[in-house]
Image (cartoon, helix red, strand yellow):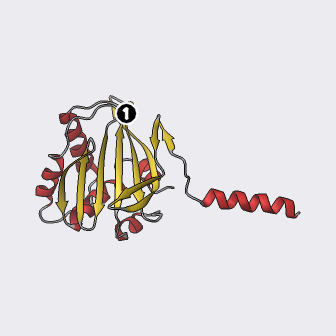
Amino acid sequence: MKQKIVPALALLLFSTLPSAFPLEIEGVKVPPQSSVNGQSLSLNGAGLRTVSLAFIPIKAYVAAFYTPSPLKSEEAVLASPGPLQFTFTFLKSVSKTQAVNAWQSQIQASMTYSYPGIEKDRTAFLGMFGAINQGGTEMIQLVGSETQVYDNGKLKGTIQGRDFQKAFLSVWFGSNPVQQDLKAALLGN
């Protein structure tokens, strides 16, 4: 009997540890770890964003969400002091106009948190994106009260304030997320 219990306990232990190997989604290798300002973050979850054009699903990008400790609910995400990081790896090349329109559409459809001054911050945010080649990345880091926007690996700007962070997080984890199964995947569910 002992011989059966030990392997079962080992399997249970290893299944609860974070993976040291990258996850692969649509050919994109998603690293299990990232670092923000010298702090190590673990992959909380990752998933595929699809959009429909004329009822045809198109695979747009792979989203990955990194956190200092596991966050499994919207409440936990909003309460986290961070830092937090989102990485979006594009599966198709997109022009600057397409990138900005996609962000604008996602924000309009899913942002549920609002505050005075959101229009100015949203305009500044949208102005930080350019064309993305297939395999290119956009990255958003929430550090303290700053939202840092990286486009193709370059810091394009920072938006100050916890309010913008809450608005940005509501796009992914609010009551009307960009994509319900992507929300679940980013939360590791």
Please tell me which residue is depicted at 36% across the width and 30% down the height of the picture: 55
Vertically, is 103 above or below 143?
above
Identify the residue shown where x is 45% and y is 64%.
71
Q: Residue visible at 47% across and 51% down?
A: 185
Q: Nearer the viewer, residue 21 or 84?
A: 21
Q: Position of residue 64 (x, y in %)?
A: 41, 49
**Callout 1 amino acid:** Leu
Q: Residue furthest right?
A: 1
Specify the quadrant that holds the N terminus: bottom right
Q: Is residue 186 left or right of residue 130?
A: right
How far across and how far down the image is residue 42, in percent?
46, 58
For disc 1, the marked residue is 91
Is the residue marked by circle 1 packed among few (<14), some (14-19), or many (20+) residues within 10 Å? many
Badge 1 element: loop
> In the picture provided, is 72 more to the left or to the right than 121?
right
Residue 170 image-quadrant placement:
bottom left
Residue at the spot x=84%, y=59% of the render? 4
